[in-house]
Amino acid sequence: MDIITVEAPAKVNLTLDVRYKRGDGYHELETVMHQIGLIDRLTLRRGRSGEINLSSNHPTLPNNQENLAYQAARLILQENGQDGVDIYIEKNIPLGAGLAGGSSDAAAVLWGMNRLFDYQFDTTQLMQLAARLGSDVPFCLLGREKGQAGRPGDALGATAIARGRGELLEEIPGCYLPWVLLVKPDFQISTAEVYRSLRLDELEQRPDTAAFLAAWRDCDIMNIAINLVNVLESVSIKQNPEIAAIKVGMIKYGALKALMSGSGPAVFGIFNEEQKARQARDEFLNAHNEVFLVSSYGRGDKSARTKITTG
Ligand code: C5P
């Protein structure tokens, strides 16, 4: 194989709870992550021995070791130094948004290079490499690492509870959310700074993960909506009121609920009517550049997935 194209979907956090700050500086999480159909596409080719060349269609995406996809290639080549790779990223996921775009690109590089060069890393080994790159990378690998033999680049999409610093994953059956509206305000947020500013003793609301999971199991969209809670909003919204304004706008335009994803600033709203979702997208496009109407991610066997009940 000389070339492979791999999809790298974004994720949203449907719940995000921080239990406590750990001795190693990370925060102990309990978060439900869900892949959505906002997708980067990576094309990987055999390159000159020992070289990593990264390019993209994005004007400000770093093409050196600052880019997590570059770090992923370097990591997997450490033990296979005679190979080299050219990586092209068709970037669609906003940067620094809380949507795991960089992590998903990195997961796609690990998975794609393993196939391209026939390295034979098994799932456990790939997951270990992923965890060394970042807390969200193992989740991004998850959807890719199941049930897709013989279909390069194809993936089923994943939903999972992530614990630990994000790397301990328990997969849960996927509901299919047909209308998820994403709005990314025109600034980026540093995840490390958000965690640094988090005051756990001052939190006003925490997710009820058990209640969320019960709603998710039944694909009961009303109760899914009620239970969307992210404790990192307490930091990111205080510092950036525009996030709250987007949430208010989402509800005004008919979303059942809107939530910031990860450490933000991207906000997603879930809708139970296509027409409302489209109107809301058009309204947000008047004032924002990065607005995307998507569904849950999944190119695999949709018949195995449960559609939501919209009441
Ligand atoms: O693992 P990753 O590099 O994506 O994390 C970025 C930063 O976010 C970490 O350096 C840490 O400050 C913070 N973080 C945390 N607890 C987590 C995940 C990330 O404190 N569970």
Image (cartoon, rainbow, N blue to C red):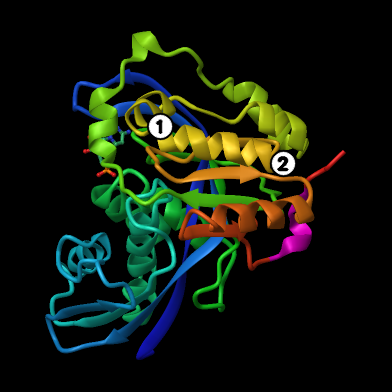
Do we see residue 283 in this rendering? yes
Which residue in the protein does label 1 denote?
A: 241
Q: Which quarter of the figure is the C terminus placed in?
A: top right
Magenta highlight range: 301-307
Residue 7 image point, x, y percent: 48, 70
Q: Are marks 2 and 1 in contact (CB under 8 Å)?
A: no
Element type at mark 1 = helix
**Ligand 1 is found in which quarter of the picture?**
top left
Tell me the residue at 63%/27% (across/down). 227
The answer to whether residue 306 is magenta is yes
On whether ligand 1 comes within 8 Å of the CB at mark 2, the answer is no
Do we see residue 121 in this rendering? no
Query: In which quarter of the view is residue 17 placed?
Result: top left
Inspect the image, locate mark 1, and give the three-letter code of the amino acid beneath it: Pro
Residue 152 or 27: which is nearer the viewer? 27
Residue 55 image point, x, y percent: 25, 79
Which residue in the protein does label 2 denote?
A: 254
Mark 2 is surrounded, within 10 Å at the Cα level, by few (under 14), some (14 to 19) or many (20 or more) other residues, namely some
Residue 300 or 117: which is nearer the viewer? 300
Residue 122 image point, x, y percent: 39, 61
